[in-house]
Amino acid sequence: MVGMDRTLVERYRNQWVAIGDDGDVVAHDLSYEKLTAMLSTMPPIRVLVRRIPAVDEPLFVGVW
């Protein structure tokens, strides 16, 4: 899986994204539920689903 591209982060701020093995976003939405619904209508592919935080949103890193 390819790392997060800065351009991708800026374009999809505050959204859920599904990223294919080639690093391209194959689907995106503000809602996780809508994103997964979109993915369920597509041919099966391997994706990494992530939420891109808003600019002013705090980031938490670590294990709970």
Image: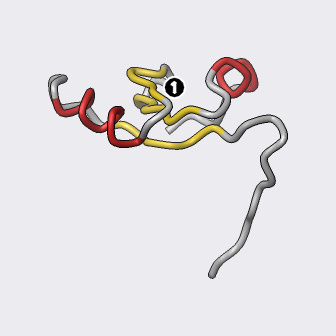
Q: Secondary structure at mark 1?
A: loop
* Left or right position of 56 against 37: right
**Residue in the image at 43% along x and 41% along y:** 48
> Where does residue 40 sit, x and y in percent of width and height?
18, 33
Quarter residue 35 falls in: top left
| Amino acid type at mark 1 | Gly
* Left or right position of 40 against 49: left
**38 in relation to 16, above or below:** above
**59 in relation to 61, above or below:** above
* Left or right position of 7 against 34: right
Quarter residue 60 falls in: bottom right
> Where does residue 11 sit, x and y in percent of width and height?
67, 18
**Residue in the image at 78% along x and 46% along y:** 57
**4 in relation to 7, above or below:** below
Say which of 2 and 49 sits in front: 49
* Left or right position of 45 against 35: left
> Where does residue 61 sit, x and y in percent of width and height?
74, 65
Q: Which residue is label 1 attached to?
A: 23
**Residue in the image at 47% along x and 22% along y:** 25
Say which of 60 and 24 sits in front: 60
